[in-house]
Image (tube, rainbow, N blue to C red):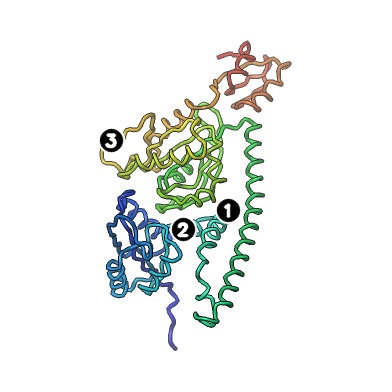
């Protein structure tokens, strides 16, 4: 009896980049390697061509396309991944010339997103982004869809199938938008409830793979997936964090950023990113062991600015300090805090920085309230943090963290 091997073959990918000088092509290609690995493929090698502008028909020059085809034949390449956004015509022309399946950077990111999404909202956002990206790329595929083949007299069935697919995708997009609207309304209700209850929110943002989930886990034991992969987590997680002063804030983890993230992908995840836009304090986490740490911080800052976060306190958090051999190797950036979310180094300074940037100055006090003022405890629970409460013969002994307004009202009852 012949035994069949059911092991799935790993997709072997060749990465292709055109360096026009508009951006750092080498760094972008390195990121593409990571994205490819995150998608579960094996990036075998990369090919780069310097051009003033990409070729309209095939993105790379004809000579380079021949070189790519030869490399694919020799090394059994299953997939070509281009570090750009290709047009439908370019994809078709490259596939015809190389006989290898072609995807671009956006398709790859969407594929990684689809792998990582866990929550209902995350899955809806990914599917919506995929369909929006797919819709214009159906154009010109009528011949491929026709069962009769190309040529005069055979266009009808293909075009009919094309229009059917378009209508189906448009209907699906509208359905997904409605479902997302319901999820977003639920999120908005939660946000308003937090505002009503005076809950202070702290959002963790930053470049993907900077260690946001590891930091979240260290601070709150949230149990969020933390892996050395791009977009290991896509879904926002909220957990309560008690600061050293006794104040409790809501810590929110958000989706990571990458450079050259296509605009419609930012749009698709805008409701998730708005958690950052509405936060009282933003922690901009970056991997300080990365040579481009400063650039990563700038990418995040630009995206935050586009979301309207300019008036929020932003604390640059330089993570992974434990990976550097010397302390002076760490880049110096404004009022940044140096930490290691893995070892816990510098976490005390981070918590202090959060307290220093709280929207309302809070004070920790001990009180002795007369029994007639027992209602004060309820006010503290509503607008502050009640640490302890004990009924004694003299009155109610309370330890709490209160804002300046409440502090003025209870000043006469403060014991220390």
Q: Quadrant of the N terminus?
A: bottom left
Q: Which residue is mark 1?
A: 119
C-alpha gap between disc 3 and disc 2:
35 Å
Residue 42 position by quadrant: bottom left
C-alpha gap between disc 1 and disc 3:
39 Å
Q: Does 264 sit above or below residue 15? A: above
Is residue 396 shown left or right of residue 115? right
Q: Residue at x 63, y 26 (%)?
A: 383
Q: Secondary structure at mark 2?
A: helix
Which residue ends up furthest to the front in the rendered image?
152
Q: Residue at x 43, y 87 (%)?
A: 2
Q: Earlier in the sequence, mark 1 or mark 2?
A: 2
Q: Position of residue 5 (x, y in %)?
A: 42, 78
Residue 112: assigned label: 2
Pointers 3 and 2 in contact (C-beta within 8 Å): no
Around disc 3, counting alpha carbons within 10 Å, would you say few (fewer than 14), some (14 to 19), or many (20 or more)?
A: few
Q: Does 268 sit above or below residue 111? A: above
Q: Secondary structure at mark 3?
A: helix
Q: Nearer the viewer, mark 1 or mark 2?
A: 2
Q: Residue at x 50, y 52 (%)?
A: 265
Pointers 1 and 2 in contact (C-beta within 8 Å): no
Around disc 1, counting alpha carbons within 10 Å, would you say few (fewer than 14), some (14 to 19), or many (20 or more)?
A: few
Q: Which residue is mark 3?
A: 327
Q: Residue at x 40, y 52 (%)?
A: 228
């Amino acid at each position: 009896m012949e035994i069949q091997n059911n092991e799935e073959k790993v997709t072997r990918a060749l990465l292709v980049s055109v360096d026009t000088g508009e951006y750092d092509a080498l760094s972008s290609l390195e990121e593409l390697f990571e994205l490819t690995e995150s998608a579960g493929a094996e990036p075998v090698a990369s090919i780069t061509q310097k051009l003033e502008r990409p070729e309209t028909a095939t993105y790379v020059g004809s000579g380079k396309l021949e070189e790519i085809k030869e490399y694919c034949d020799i090394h059994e390449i299953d997939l070509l991944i281009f570090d750009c956004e290709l047009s439908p015509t370019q994809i078709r022309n490259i596939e015809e010339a190389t006989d290898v399946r072609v995807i671009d950077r956006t398709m790859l990111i969407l594929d990684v997103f689809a792998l990582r999404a866990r929550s209902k909202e995350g899955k809806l956002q990914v599917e919506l982004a995929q369909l929006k990206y797919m819709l214009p790329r159906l154009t010109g595929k009528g011949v491929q869809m026709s069962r009769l083949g190309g040529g005069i007299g055979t266009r009808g069935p293909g075009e009919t199938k094309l229009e059917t697919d378009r209508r189906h995708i448009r209907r699906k997009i509208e359905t997904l938008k409605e479902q997302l609207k319901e999820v977003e309304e639920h999120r908005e209700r939660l946000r308003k409830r937090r505002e009503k209850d005076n809950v202070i929110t702290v959002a963790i943002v930053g470049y993907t793979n900077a260690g946001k989930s590891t930091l979240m886990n260290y601070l709150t034991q949230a149990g969020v997936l933390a892996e050395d992969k791009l977009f290991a987590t896509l879904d926002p997680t909220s957990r309560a964090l008690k600061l050293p002063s006794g104040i409790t804030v809501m810590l929110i983890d958000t989706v990571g950023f990458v450079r050259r993230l296509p605009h419609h992908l930012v749009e698709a995840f805008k409701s998730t990113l708005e958690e950052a836009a509405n936060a009282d304090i933003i922690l901009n986490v970056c991997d300080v062991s990365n040579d481009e740490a400063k650039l990563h911080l700038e990418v995040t800052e630009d995206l935050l600015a586009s979301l309207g976060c300019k008036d929020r306190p932003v604390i640059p958090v330089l993570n992974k300090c434990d990976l550097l051999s010397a302390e002076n190797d760490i880049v110096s950036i404004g009022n940044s805090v140096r930490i290691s979310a893995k070892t816990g180094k510098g976490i005390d300074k981070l918590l202090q920085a959060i307290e220093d940037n709280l929207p309302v100055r809070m004070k920790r006090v001990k009180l002795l309230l007369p029994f007639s003022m027992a209602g004060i405890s309820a006010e503290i629970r509503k607008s502050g943090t009640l640490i302890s409460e004990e009924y004694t013969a003299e009155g109610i002994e309370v330890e709490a963290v209160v804002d300046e307004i409440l502090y003025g009202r209870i000043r006469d009852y403060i014991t220390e």
